[in-house]
Image (cartoon, rainbow, N blue to C red):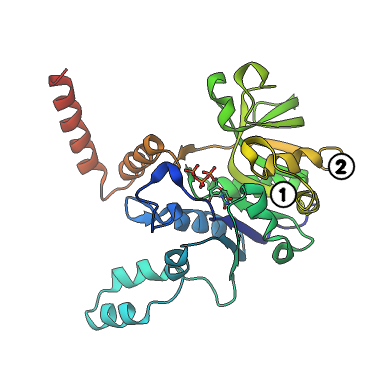
Amino acid sequence: MALPVRKAVFPVGGLGTRFLPATKAVPKEMLPVVDKPLIQYAVEEARAAGIEEFIFVTGHGKTALEDHFDRHWELETTLNQRGKRHELGLLEATQQPAGAVVYTRQPEPLGLGHAVRCAAKLVGAEPFAVLLADDLVLAETPCLKQMVEVHAETGGNVVAVMDVPREHTARYGVLDVVSDDGRLAKAQGLVEKPKPEDAPSTLSIIGRYVLQPEVMTELAQVREGAGGEIQLTDALAATLDRVDFYGLRFEGVRFDCGDKAGYLEANIAFALARDDLRDKAKEILARYGAAADAAG
Ligand code: UTP
C-alpha cells in the first residue's frame, strides 16, 4: 500500500512573461477564470484530493496571493453588517485550517525543478503532490483526486498526461512508454521539450504530479537543463531506475492558462459550465460569432 498523499506544493514563483503587462504587479496565478483566481481552483482541487498541507513556493511580488488566502477582517465585518451571506460564503472558500498553509520563497526564478526543490524541507520524506495553477482542469472528478486514487494502487511517481499533436512536443515533458493500457502508461524514459522528430511519443505531462521523496533527492543534484532552467522532468528521469513512473490519461479537459488563447478558452468553457452564466455566455458567443462571420 502506498503512503497517503497529504502535502501539495504550488510553485508560483514564475515570471509569467507571456502575460505581461497583466503580470507586472499581479501574479499569473491570481488571474481569474470567470470570478476565481487560478490558484484557488488548484487549492480546491488539492483539498478535494485529501490534501491537508498547502505549500506555496512564491517569489518576488506575490503578496496578493498570500493576502488572498488570509482573513480579511474589515471586508468580512462590512459584509456581515450588510447581511451579505452569499458573499461571506465565497470568502470562506479561501480559508484553510490554521497552520495548513505554508509559504516559502524561491529566491530566483531558476525553473520549475528549482521551485519544487525549495519545498524539500517542508515536504520531508513522504509522497507529495505538485500542482501548477496555470494548468486548469475542468473535470467531473478533480484531476488530482483521480491521480491520488491511482497512486494508492500503484505507488511510484504518477503524473497527469495527455496526447498532444506531435508538432507541440517541444512544449512538454514527454514519456518514453514501455506499456500502455489506454488509461495508464508506464514510462522507461522522459525527455523535456523534445523536438517533434526526437520525441519518443506524444504522451505529454501537464501540471499535475504525485511524486516520491526520491525526486527531492535528485532535485538537489540536477543541473540546468532545457532552456537553462532546473527542470523537474530531469529529476523525474533520474529516479526511473528505482521508482516506477506512470502517466495517467486523466478524465477532463485541460486549459493552458499560461497562454493567452488557452486562458481565453478556459474563461469560455468555465462560463459555459456554470448554471448562472451558461445562457448569457452562449448568447454572447453566438452574437460575436455571427458578427465575425458577417465581417468575413
Ligand atoms: P512557466 O513555464 O509557465 O513559466 O512555469 P512562467 O515564468 O510562470 O511563465 P512565462 O513562461 O514566463 O510566461 C510553469 C509553472 O512553474 C512555476 C510557474 O509559476 C508556473 O506555475 N515556476 C516556473 C516557478 O515557480 N518558478 C520558476 O522559476 C519557474
Residue 97 sits in quarter? bottom right
Residue 143: x %, y % from top left: 56, 45
Give 131 or 119, whichever is nearer the viewer.
Answer: 119
Residue 22: x %, y % from top left: 35, 50
Residue 263, above or below 215: above
Does dot 2 land on a helix, a strand or a loop? loop
Give 129 or 85, whichever is nearer the viewer.
Answer: 129
Give 64 or 107, whichever is nearer the viewer.
Answer: 107
Q: Quadrant of the C terminus?
A: top left
Give the crowd class for mark 2: few <14, some 14-19, many >=20 residues within 10 Å: few
Residue type at the position of mark 2: Arg
Q: In the rendering, which numbered label is found on residue 294?
A: none
Give 211 or 197, whichever is nearer the viewer.
Answer: 197
Question: Which is more N-terminal, label 1 or label 2?
Answer: 1
Q: In the rendering, which numbered label is found on residue 211?
A: 1
Q: Is residue 12 left or right of residue 23?
A: right
Residue 66, above or below 203: below
Residue 261 sits in quarter? top left
Q: Which residue is mark 2?
A: 242
> Residue at position x 23%, y 36% from top?
282
> Residue at position x 67%, y 42% from top?
231
Q: Calculate the distance from the C-alpha at mark 2 to the C-alpha at mark 1.
A: 13 Å
Residue 19: x %, y % from top left: 39, 44
Give the crowd class for mark 1: few <14, some 14-19, many >=20 residues within 10 Å: many
